[in-house]
Image (cartoon, rainbow, N blue to C red):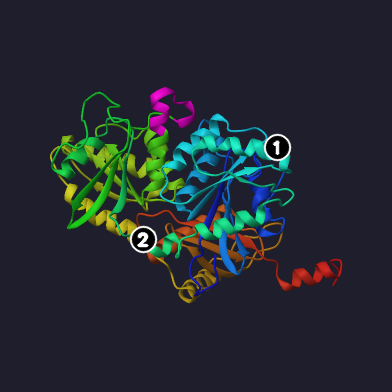
Amino acid sequence: MTEEGTGPLPVVAVVGRPNVGKSTLVNRVLGRRAAVVQDVPGVTRDRISYEALWNGRRFTVTDTGGWDPKAAGLGAAITRQAEFAMKTADVIVLVVDSQVGATDTDLAAARILRRSDRPVILVANKVDDERSEAGASELWSLGLGEPQPISALHGRGAGDLLDLILDSMPEAPREQEGETGPRRVALVGRPNVGKSSLLNRLAKEERSVVDSVAGTTVDPVDSIITLGGEDWRFVDTAGLRRKVNTASGMEYYASLRTEAAIQAAEVAVVLLAADEVISEQDQRVITQVIEAGRALVIAINKWDLLDEDRHMQLEREVDRDLARIKWASRVNISAKGGRGVGKLADHLRAALASWESRIPTAELNQYIRTLVQETPPPARGGRAPKIKYVTQADVRPPRFVVFSTGFLEAGYRRFLERKLRERWGFDGTPIEISVKVREGRESERRKGTGGQR
């Protein structure tokens, strides 16, 4: 977060495959040891941001986990975090180990970054002396321009790299430039739930191939659609059959592109088939949208095919199987017949408004104080934590930080989320609540006196 009133800072994302020295480079940029560094791959898992200063200019540098498009399990989640960092950065720094040379993973990253609409700086790390520079020059083959030889560990070339980063930054951070194009909507769901039919209905022409055989769409298809008097950029995506790490061949790459489409979108419309039960694949698609932090609209398609008994049964299934996302905006539609499709625009606008909403700090804390007086956090280890302060750290989606004197149980955090939704709505958007523990003065005094009174 930046200081209030100064606005957002430009963002520099440091990306690359595991164990190329990304965290070491971040520490070099910061001038202090902030990022965890260890000589094994995979230490950094989440994207972590720090505020940096060089030549009088402040900016945010984001350290990311190792990027690997073929990673499975936890590695796949780490890769998604790195890809998100790339999409939200103003400058991207790709770090490559000059002693190893360009690997298949480096080549895959370069192919993606060559299509990026923002500056990309190629860093050849571990160039500790002039004899090592030959390995750096071989990285021209990645097609990202001149490799910048540095030694993140020893600082060699770091100043020149920082100068280049500052020269590559835009006049205003990407967030300040504002949205100039249509809002971005991803149409997602498992195969054959009617995504392409819905896109064709919205476009009033055949933009996507529709077939009763599941899996017709492989590449995301972009379409500018006028809906509710407003232009929207819809992306029809391949149906997600299974987890990316268990997919193979064409399906694997289709799944990757679908995940990228969700990350690039602002709001996702998840289609469910009314004539089928809510499946594990449906749940997984919804989870992907939530983990990506995107606004969410649930569209139940083929509603017109059901009789009254099935309508009632489906309502019970939704209440049971989607209980965790009662906050999601929901609309019943028929992609083929057109029923309810016109209502989509209002649902999209409402979800995006919640996604971008910010609560004034004074109003937020006044509400939380009253709430905590009525229902204080449960004691843990014989001591009840006290909530000192709450702030909304971010939007898109709304993120709240609770400053407390002790750990808050997961159940109490869910209680806080439920109450925030009851008070301010947040319909159609996930919200995130994190806790920062700050011990009270009394506890600090006890530590200073060895715990004695």
Q: Residue at x 42, y 37 (%)?
A: 284
Is 406 above or below relative to 276? below
Q: Is residue 146 left or right of residue 322?
A: right
Give the residue at mark 1: 40
Task: Name the quarter where the N terminus is drawn.
Answer: bottom right
Q: Is residue 1 left or right of residue 183?
A: right
Q: Residue at x 61, y 57 (%)?
A: 162
- Magenta run includes residue 365: no
Is 418 above or below relative to 446? above
Task: Name the quarter where the C terminus is drawn.
Answer: bottom right
* Dots 1, 2 in contact, CB < 8 A: no
Tell me which secondary structure the magenta stretch mostly adopts.
helix
Return the disc, 1 or 2, that comes first in the chain's sequence.
1
Give the residue at mark 2: 354
The residue closer to the viewer here, 176 or 320, is 176
Q: Amino acid at mark 1?
A: Val
Q: Position of residue 445 (x, y in %)?
A: 79, 72
Q: Amino acid at mark 2?
A: Ser
Disc 2 secondary structure class: helix
Asked whether residue 273 appears in the rendered view, the answer is yes
Report the disc number at residue 379.
none
Q: Residue at x 55, y 39 (%)?
A: 67
- Magenta run includes residue 250: yes
Disc 1 secondary structure class: loop
Instruction: Determine which quarter of the picture holds residue 248.
Output: top left
Instruction: Determine which quarter of the picture holds residue 38.
Output: top right
Is 126 above or below relative to 360? above
Instruction: Determine which quarter of the picture holds residue 60.
Output: bottom right
Badge 2: residue crowd in 10 Å (few <14, some 14–19, many ≥20): many
Span highlighted in magenta in the image: 243-255
